[in-house]
Image: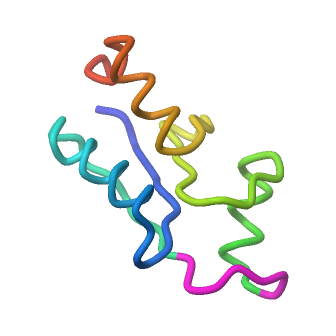
Amino acid sequence: MAYIEIYTKRNCPYCERAKSLLIKKSLDFKEIIIDNHNSLNSVYIEMQQRSNGCTTVPQIFIDGLHIGGSDDLISLDNQGKLHLI
């Protein structure tokens, strides 16, 4: 099974949408919560580096590969590729 990581922020509807889809598909994931978006937050900096500069959440990685945000995850599902993970 794939290793899924998702960077999220509390009270983020896009993050909730992505997590709900992963749960619906019975896919385990590691949630990494970013408490604040500032240049001093090491988790936020890590997310930016891993995602080629993306600053929005969620940012989703599958087996270390950057997938994108919630719309990208939904697109994978609509293409029938999410269940292959």
- As drawn, 81 above or below 70: above
Name the image quarter holding the N terminus: top left
Q: Which of 64 and 39 is in front in this view?
A: 39
Q: In which quarter of the image is the C terminus?
A: top left
Front-most of residues 32 and 57? 57
Q: Quadrant of residue 15?
A: bottom left
Q: Is residue 39 magenta?
A: yes
Asked if residue 10 is positioned above or below residue 15 in the image, the reply reads: below
Identify the magenta region. 34-40
**Position of residue 30 measured from the top left corner of the image (x, y, whole percent):** 37, 59
Most extreme residue toward the top, as rendered? 79
Q: Position of residue 24 (x, y in %)?
A: 15, 41
Picture layout, residue 26 above or below residue 11: above
Q: Which residue lies furthest to the front in this view?
A: 13
Residue 61 in the image: state x and y as whole percent: 53, 43
Q: Position of residue 12 (x, y in %)?
A: 45, 69
Dominant SS of magenta comes to: loop
